[in-house]
Amino acid sequence: MITISSTRGYHHGDLRRTILDAAAEAITESGPAGWSLRELARRAGVSHAAPAHHFGDKAGLLTALATEGFQLLADELNSVPDDFLEAGVAYVRFATGHRAHFEVMFQPALLRSDDPELQAAENRASTALEEGLRKAVPPERASGDMRLAAWSIAHGFAALWLSGAIADRVGEDAVEAARPVLRNLLRG
Amino acid sequence: MITISSTRGYHHGDLRRTILDAAAEAITESGPAGWSLRELARRAGVSHAAPAHHFGDKAGLLTALATEGFQLLADELNSVPDDFLEAGVAYVRFATGHRAHFEVMFQPALLRSDDPELQAAENRASTALEEGLRKAVPPERASGDMRLAAWSIAHGFAALWLSGAIADRVGEDAVEAARPVLRNLLRG
DNA sequence: CGCGGTATCTTGTCAGTGTCAAGTTGTCCG
DNA sequence: CGGACAACTTGACACTGACAAGATACCGCG
């Protein structure tokens, strides 16, 4: 049995998870550079060097976050019917619902790209994406370029919304706003 | 007359431009967080606090870079015929040709969003983009959602390529690879 | 039960960083 | 020529990431 509630004493209980969550929260609020390891440690009530034990260094923490992100994305994509619109909407839902993960996942300069767990998670998400696109795109239009186009439009919409660049045209609910935009890729 | 060549003496000549270029180079190599103001100062041969005189702080430097980026993007978009494909290709050409600018422009957490020069440059790029899309999209399919779709697919392709996520499918020349992908938005 | 090994966390330290304040040098205009 | 201003330097401070060494709690094995 894992005792999460006891945050007292020398052992924290589940410091790794606590730090990951705190990092995600901090990144969501202030971006991938607006926080420090020491701040996360203070928030979790541990010493300034405690995070390093679990993640090695800052890049290790971000790599762990990205790994978790790719796993979450794969789950999200696998839980959706074989429909392009719904797959694209699921992609946008993931990006907006897990903003911190999404932002870190696509900034390789912050990560240890050679981490085996990260690569495994990337592969899982990649095949989920590829398979989803293969099933979702109408056979007469199926092609590598078409699948890239589908990925691009969903990714671009999510990135633009997260950056605030289209906030004036879209409003708060990015997921619902994505639907009519994505529809344009499959005819008019 | 401006003497750029004389980097000697108490006055540098054109330190502001030198720092901006060095920052763009550093970001291109190591990402938006893989460098320091003091490193740029050393590279330029000035004291560690010299950059602050021109930009205030790190956010000020990045804001100046983003401002320059929006101006360059507007120029790029304005120099292109009223054709959706060419507008999209120009967008991708800008993103890959000015990687550092592009990455900073869409990370508002790094910037001073209330900077008047930044906002002016944003507006100029925004109208250039809007106007280009308005002319480029066939009238029978023109709509706000269609314009958003066009922006999204170009932005998404550029972002995915820069992150290396589609390197295995695309190769080195992102601009040429973008063409067949973008074509999918206007029928098949 | 107890004891040794190990994972977890702490404490102390160091070079490097961003930012501020105050001083120095060069330029330009009246 | 003089003084105001811009450009840059010097010095300082709190903070950070990373490392080394030590302390504490848990866990298996006798």
Image (cartoon, coloured by chain):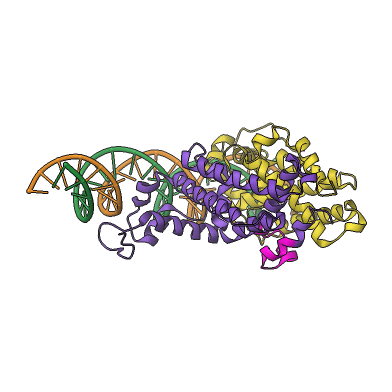
Chain colours: A yellow, B purple, C green, D orange
Q: Position of residue A164 (x, y in %)?
A: 63, 39
Image spot of residue B179 (x, y percent): 73, 61
Asked if residue B120 is positioned above or below residue B103 in the image, the reply reads: above
The x, y position of residue A61, in whole percent, is 62, 49
Give x and y (percent) for residue B31: 55, 56
Q: Residue at x 82, y 62 (%)?
A: A144
Q: Residue at x 90, y 45 (%)?
A: A81
Q: Nearer the viewer, residue B186 or B41?
A: B186
Q: Quadrant of residue A89?
A: top right
Can residue A42 be seen by looking at this rendering? yes
Which residues are drawn in magenta?
B160-179
Viewed as shown, does residue B36 lie left or right of B166?
left
Q: Is residue B110 left or right of residue A87?
A: left
Q: Is residue B171 magenta?
A: yes
Q: Quadrant of residue B3?
A: bottom left
Q: Which quarter of the rendered picture does the N terminus of chain A lie within?
A: top right
Viewer-closest of A48 and B62: B62
In this view of the protein, can residue A68 be seen by the observer? no
